[in-house]
Amino acid sequence: MFKPLISDGLLDATGFLGGSLTGFWLGRWLGLDIFDAGYGPGTIVAIVLVSLGGGIGLQLAKSWRAKRSSKR
């Protein structure tokens, strides 16, 4: 009963974390630092990149899970 819930949660967490890290490293590659002191424009853009990356990663994980379950 709980096994599908655990696997769904782990897949969502993996997608979110992977997307967030992708956004973080994209920001670092662009010279932006999310951990910079204050909330300057570069820091705000870095925060947005991490947030968007996490959201996109989560949606990709959910889409992949839905495709996988429809094939069964």
Image (cartoon, rainbow, N blue to C red):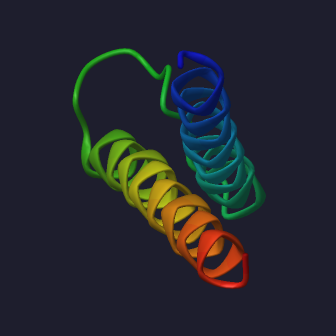
User: Residue 9 sits in which quadrant?
Assistant: top right
Left or right: 13 in relation to 21? left
Left or right: 52 in relation to 8? left
55 is higher (above) or lower (below) than 16: below
Residue 5 placed where, x, y %? Answer: 51, 27
Left or right: 40 in relation to 20? left
User: Residue 22 sits in which quadrant?
Assistant: bottom right
Q: Quadrant of the C terminus?
A: bottom right
50 is higher (above) or lower (below) than 59: above
Residue 55 placed where, x, y %? Answer: 39, 56
| Residue nearest the observer in this picture, 60 or 38 | 60
Q: Residue at x 47, y 66 (%)?
A: 56
| Residue nearest the observer in this picture, 13 or 25 | 13
Residue 27 placed where, x, y %? Answer: 61, 54
Q: Residue at x 57, y 38 (%)?
A: 8
Q: Residue at x 26, y 51 (%)?
A: 41
60 is higher (above) or lower (below) than 2: below
Residue 12 placed where, x, y %? Answer: 55, 41
